[in-house]
Image (tube, grey):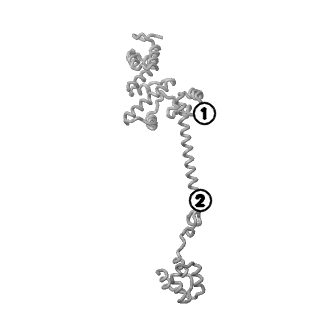
Amino acid sequence: MSMLPSFGFTQEQVACVCEVLQQGGNLERLGRFLWSLPACDHLHKNESVLKAKAVVAFHRGNFRELYKILESHQFSPHNHPKLQQLWLKAHYIEAEKLRGRPLGAVGKYRVRRKFPLPRTIWDGEETSYCFKEKSRGVLREWYTHNPYPSPREKRELAEATGLTTTQVSNWFKNRRQRDRAAEAKERENSENNNSGANKQNQLSPLDGGKSLMSSSEDEFSPPQSPDQNSVLLLQEVDLTNTERRSFLWSAEVKTCTITEVKRGIVGGDSQVTSADRHSVITS
């Protein structure tokens, strides 16, 4: 553990100071401390110092410097979550400034696709919305057995997946909401299909598409008036003489029943002329 020339601290002590100032949130003081470090390549390649420089660059909005630091050094896996967060947040902020509005879930997804994590801070395992596929697999397997884990079970799942308890809770909540929405959509589609099938069954193939539930037009048509019945009957029955025709032309025929008309004219052998029918219709 050798002392750094003209500085009075060892490399390990410098790394410890950087960690303490980061955890305490004293980022301006951390920036001044980094600025005071001597020009020593070995010191500036220390991972704790590089991570501290990345944090200060993000704090000051110097994203170009941040990206340069993150892409130029292979960081240890235990530092990946923190540095990945800096990478994504910086790109989100730049995208929001460019668009002039906050990013939604879809907007953030597009940013992640456009600016994937560099391999220097990523182990190469596929992630989905910042969840590793391995972690999602653990949560999905648990969900199939119990969609409502207890607080103790959520803590255990958080430890097993490397997520926070809040992230685990939100994942289960969102998954339940998606499943309920899918079930409601499936029920709606099923009801619509059944309704369409019932309407199809109500159409008779023998009556040209008329509903089987409805009666024929004859059953619902209003009864014909005596005048109409008389005219129709006269078109079908033979008359024998002028007296019978006179009888039928009289006003009494217009008010008599169909049965009475039949009794008065049955037995004739002459036919009604077109002129006679016309006079009845127009009288």
Please, what secondary structure does the residue beneath circle 1 have?
A: helix
Q: Looking at the picture, how far across and down is residue 168, in whole percent?
A: 54, 31
Foreground residue among 113 and 19: 19
Q: Does residue 234 sit above or below 161 in this rendering?
A: below
Disc 2: which residue: 201
Disc 1: which residue: 142
Q: Looking at the picture, how far across and down is residue 89, in whole percent?
A: 43, 30
Q: Earlier in the sequence, mark 1 or mark 2?
A: 1
Q: Amino acid at mark 1?
A: Trp
Q: Does residue 6 sit above or below 220 in this rendering?
A: above
**Image-based side of 32 in relation to 240, left or right:** left
Foreground residue among 245 and 159: 245
Please, what secondary structure does the residue beneath circle 2 have?
A: helix
Q: Looking at the picture, how far across and down is residue 129, in whole percent?
A: 50, 34
Q: Looking at the picture, how far across and down is residue 99, in whole percent?
A: 38, 36
**For the point 54% across and 38% down, which residue is it?**
177
Give the numbered dot on residue 3.
none
Q: Residue furthest right?
A: 145
Residue 172 occupies which quadrant of the picture? top right
Q: Is residue 206 visible?
A: yes
